[in-house]
Amino acid sequence: MTFERCRAAALALSLALSVASCSAGDGNSGTPVRASTTEITVPPLPAASASLPSNRESYPFLASDHDATPVDLGQHGYVEQEFLVSGRANVYSWPDLATLAVLGSGPYVTRILVRRPSDPTRFSGSVRVEPLNPTSGHDLDAEWEIAHNGFMHSGDAYVGVTISPDTIGALKRFDPARYGGLSMASPMAPASRCAPYPGSTDTSGETGLAWDVLSQVGRLVKTDSPANPLHDLHPRISTLTGWSQSGSYDLTYLDAIARHVQLPDGRPIFDGYLPGAGSYAATPISQCAALPPSGDPRARYDPPSGTPVIVVTTPTDFYSAASFDRRTDRPADSDTPTRRIRLYEIGGGSHLPGDQGWYFPNADELARAGFAPEARTTYPLSSFPLHVVLDAAFANLDSWVSTGTAPPHTTRLTPHDTTTWPVVPDLDQLGNPVGGVRTVAVDVPIATFVPRGLRAPHSNNSYYAGYDIPFSPEYLKVLYPTHADYLRKVSTDIHRLVEDRWLTSYDAAELADQARAANIPAKWGWSTRDVTIYPIRIAGDPVLHSPTRTVLDFGDALTALVAGMFESMYAAGGVGLAANQIGVELRVFVYDCPDADGLWHSGVVINPQLQTSGVPAAADPETDSEGCLSVPFDTYPTARAEWAKVIGQDLTGAPIEILASGTLARCFQHEVDHLDGHLFLEALTGEYAEAARLMIKERSWTVPGNSWLPDVPEGTPRPIDRNFPTRSGRVRGPLAPVRDRRVTW
């Protein structure tokens, strides 16, 4: 098939938080009860219940053994407990960085979810406190989802705090008996209330109570009172952390609240902060407050004097932060006694990786809370090991707090062009970001880690959810001729990252084990010498008009067939080829073509099943031209879905899923049509359908037996001989002329 113009689709990304605003100025209505610029208060201790029972009939929402991928805490020497905490909390006005005023005060009852070592001697001394992420309308323990293995290996305690009236409503639906008493009711007069977000009309709750809730829980976990669920552990360090919207809560807390509260002995409520992802922007101080605008001091990181802060962000978040209106909100690193801060922009991965998504609540939990399953994407989430970055960041933060040892410095991501939107960081030749916090995954790569997902049906947060483009077996052999070469490069990088404090020894051992077990380069494959070039069947041959058979034998014969298909495709100047186009009635196709971002992909899919977005009613003659190696010399505008996913098997029979956009999506749809017994001509409409019918008649392509044999010009590149990426990577060097060819299947 011929694709005359390849055009990347622009994918917008918005990380801004939207809130209702009731007034101008500081965004609050009502008259302040008390204003202060210097006063520091000690938050009261909240009341805490006994540990709530956990059994088959009643258990915590977000219980680890009920995650989509269950976690058995007992195997790690951990226990999980849930407590109700209650007290009184204020609603604040925050007109400028130094001023905090009380607008109202009222009671609250919320819950905390505690995970801790069952043996106190295993406790590290550190507590991670996370405001549970309310973005989805129910609690998400997002930081725990990503970093729980590191927490448990280190012996850290974890406390998740419900901080939203919305998510309290979800808890009550999940288990009315267990959570019926929870409340974050607004203490404001009805006329002074606002809805929590656009489209909502519920003004009964008040998210602004969250700040005092966090202060009081922060004090509780440091007290020796028996009411403290951690009193037998005697915590030394407490860290406020969070991911995505929870990271934004962290920013508002440390800017607006932290400088105004302390423990009775003068120590800070939280010893350090580690906000992550989306934390370039703060959260409004109350439901009636506006989001601090970009450039406002309240929107920047201005922690209390001497408090260590490490901000961790992903390339997905960079699209917002690196734009002109967010650039000033990226804090400069500092090691002064009064300002201790790092911004770690990760050189790879995405806002919502597999590290997190694999540990979402399971479908039963969500259904009981009134939600559909967390099917945020219709493609596999990225395997980028985000947890190794967080594990090292927490270790460095603890050292900064306890010994004053400053964390390492690193470069940041840089925008390729700040005049375009979304802003894209500079990429290396394999499509991964240049600079930022380095990992083995990008230093010794086996894939491109795409930071933004594709819009797809039933995919409510797809822009945040990146995916992987694994390199082809052929290119892996170029990068790493032997398994020993791959291991040597991984080992060298691991040693450097550990020495420079970017990788913990625990994660280093895990990554080394994974590298030893990896099939890199693949133990299967083919030589391109003496490979058959097959004649390509032309329209009218029955083999092109009948469904193909499922592949059952994944032996040498299949490997030889695929090798010949690749050779025939390249010899014909094509970018895709189905087995029945060479007369083999098996469900196999090969491909080598670009996606919407210009990254080229090469591979084989066996026994494919296809999923797509909606197909437009009509084709665009300027951009949708399509042709076929089995209908040589002609192209026609053909309507295709914007994205496609194939689910199938590789040459070993292992399952694979590949998400495609741009030309690659068109290719997948075209090739699966072949395997189902259909030519692209059948999808034509109107004048194009009539033109194709006349062409077939004129050329007598209505009878069996027509075929053509591709020529093999001297110097034609073969998959095994190429010195460039075939699965992924911006096309450079020897492949550049190929991008100007007619793209044909």
Image (cartoon, rainbow, N blue to C red):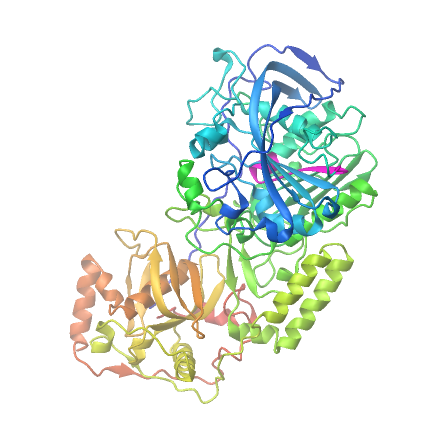
Q: Nearer the viewer, residue 238 or 451?
A: 238
In-image side of 109 versus 215 (left or right): left
Q: Where residue 109 sits: x, y (%)? A: 56, 24
- Identify which residue, 591 or 461, lies in the foreground: 461
Where residue 119 appears, as percent x and y from the top left, is: 70, 46
Q: Quadrant of residue 668?
A: bottom left
Where, by quadrant of the figure, is residue 282 drawn? top right
Give the magenta range: 234-248
Q: Residue at image x 47%, y 66%?
A: 601
Give x and y (percent) for residue 475.
Answer: 54, 73
Residue drawn 71% across the image and 63% down it: 494
606 relative position to 470: left or right: left
| Depicted 744 relative to depicted 311: above or below | below
The answer to whether residue 712 of the structure is visible from this angle is no
Q: How many marks?
A: 0
In-image side of 148 versus 642 (left or right): right
Q: Is residue 312 visible?
A: yes
